[in-house]
Image (tube, helix red, strand yellow):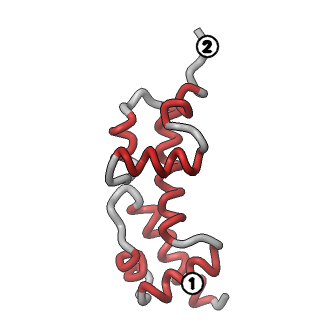
Amino acid sequence: MTTGQFSRLEMMVRMMAREYKNPLTLEQIAAAAGLHPNYACALFSQASGVSPHVYLNRLRLTHAQRLLATTNMKIVDIALDAGFASLSRFYSTFSSACHCTPTTYRKRFIPPA
């Protein structure tokens, strides 16, 4: 990877880290680095091993996991705060990645009575 490509990748990662709570398109992510969406996706995937979409979902899931473990927020509020467009999309993505539901995940962090 060239220095220029690394710099463009860094621009995309920073943009996603800053904006993951908002709806983001590949076009917006690519524009943050001044790249065509197809090239941005290929560059990102080659460098990180995952697509920008997968990386964005991982950022959102990490935020949701933190909130599940440390707050009493309603799950729907956590889903929306983490940037998921719907509760069903959140449950589907969370369950697939974490192999449990958000409720089950949260129960791991509740101290025994």
Quadrant housing the N terminus? bottom right
Give the crowd class for mark 2: few <14, some 14-19, many >=20 residues within 10 Å.
few
Quadrant housing the C terminus? top right
Q: Which residue is mark 1?
A: 43
- Looking at the image, residue 95 sits to the left or right of residue 87; the answer is right
Which residue occupies 36% across, 31% down?
74
- Looking at the image, residue 37 sits to the left or right of residue 22; the answer is right
Which residue occupies 44% across, 44% down?
91
Q: Position of residue 42 (x, y in %)?
A: 55, 84
Q: Amino acid at mark 2?
A: Pro
> Which SS class for mark 2?
loop
The answer to whether the residue labelled 1 contacts the one labelled 2, judged by CB atoms less than 8 Å apart, is no
Which residue occupies 53% across, 49% down?
62
Q: Position of residue 65 (x, y in %)?
A: 52, 41
89 or 46: nearer the eye? 89
Q: Marks 1 and 2, how far apart in space?
A: 47 Å
24 or 11: nearer the eye? 24
Give the crowd class for mark 1: few <14, some 14-19, many >=20 residues within 10 Å.
many
Q: Which residue is mark 2?
A: 112
Q: Amino acid at mark 1?
A: Leu
Q: Is residue 56 above or below residue 2?
A: above
Q: Position of residue 103 (x, y in %)?
A: 49, 31
- The quarter holding residue 22 reads bottom left
Q: Is residue 40 above or below residue 15?
A: below
Q: Position of residue 36 (x, y in %)?
A: 42, 89
Which residue occupies 63% across, 73% down?
48
> Which SS class for mark 1?
helix
